[in-house]
Image (cartoon, rainbow, N blue to C red):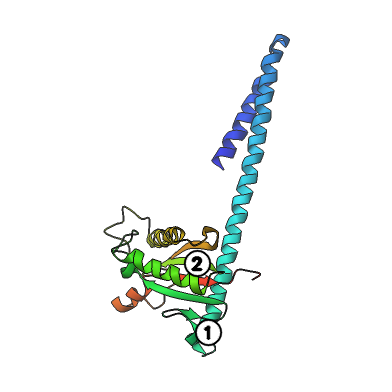
Amino acid sequence: MKRMSYVIGVLLALTAVVMLPGCESGKDMQIAELQRQVDDLQFQQGDLKSRLASALNGGDQARQMALSLQQQLDEARRQLAEGIAMQGEMPPGWKGTTSIAWIDIADDILFNAGKASFKKGGADKVREIAETIQSEFPERQIWVVGHTDNDPIKVTKHLWSDNLDLSLNRAATVGREFYKLGLDPQDVFVAGQGEYRPKATNNSKTNKALNRRVEIIAVEAPGD
């Protein structure tokens, strides 16, 4: 938006120069050049507006996809609670239904406290998950969602704005590893939820440990 305000300001300034009283007709070439610059800036302004509209539309689509995914997860969990889903058909450690499956990886398996780079053995766990996806869910979209507890970041607060920032960067680390392992980047989506989607109330060390996790979700793509 600042860029567009700047462009509009330049347009007005250039127009004022063209219309200054006392300009001699012998300056036609200068006026023509200014007009060319005005036309160019108008084009840039239109391009910026178009890009902004596209970005906003993309953000709306992402939110709609996330909302749809959450609705599917909630329904699948309801079915699991009612014993509808066939858990025996899921790979070890995974839960889900015929159309959606997920697994939680505790953050202390993948990362040291407050960090978003793999600890020793973390990448091996992600490789194991990727192999399961490739063999069991090869045609599905893969969502990687980071979660934290509600404790504020202390030791590494110089690295992250807040828990949401940390959770997103942890998910991105897993997503990049999936790319390296051969999963199609077009089918891998990375997101962070911070402390806002806990599995349990953050009222004990045990519950907080449950909430600190990376959730891997394999879901059928729309239209499949």
Residue 204: image location, x then y, percent: 30, 78
Residue 91: image location, x then y, percent: 45, 79
**Marker count (numbered):** 2
Q: Amino acid at mark 2?
A: Trp
Which structural element holds mark 2?
Answer: strand
For the point 60% across and 29% down, the residue is: 10
Q: Residues within 10 Å of mark 2 (few under 14, many from 20)?
A: many
Residue 223 in which image quadrant: bottom right
46 shown above or below 82: above
- Quadrant where the N terminus lies? top right
Q: Which residue is mark 2?
A: 143
- Quadrant where the C terminus lies? bottom right
Q: Which residue is mark 1?
A: 78
For the point 66% across and 30% down, the residue is: 40
- Most distant residue in the bottom direction: 83
CB within 8 Å, label 1 to label 2: no
Q: Amino acid at mark 1?
A: Arg
Which structural element holds mark 1?
Answer: helix
Residue 116: image location, x then y, percent: 35, 59
| Left or right: 52, with 150 as reference point | right
199 shown above or below 88: above
For the point 52% across and 87% down, the residue is: 86
User: What's the CA distance linking mark 1 and mark 2?
Assistant: 20 Å
Residue 152: image location, x then y, percent: 33, 63
- Most distant residue in the left direction: 155
- The residue nearer to you, when weighing 57 against 23, is 57
The mark closer to the camera, 1 or 2, is 2
Residue 186 in which image quadrant: bottom right
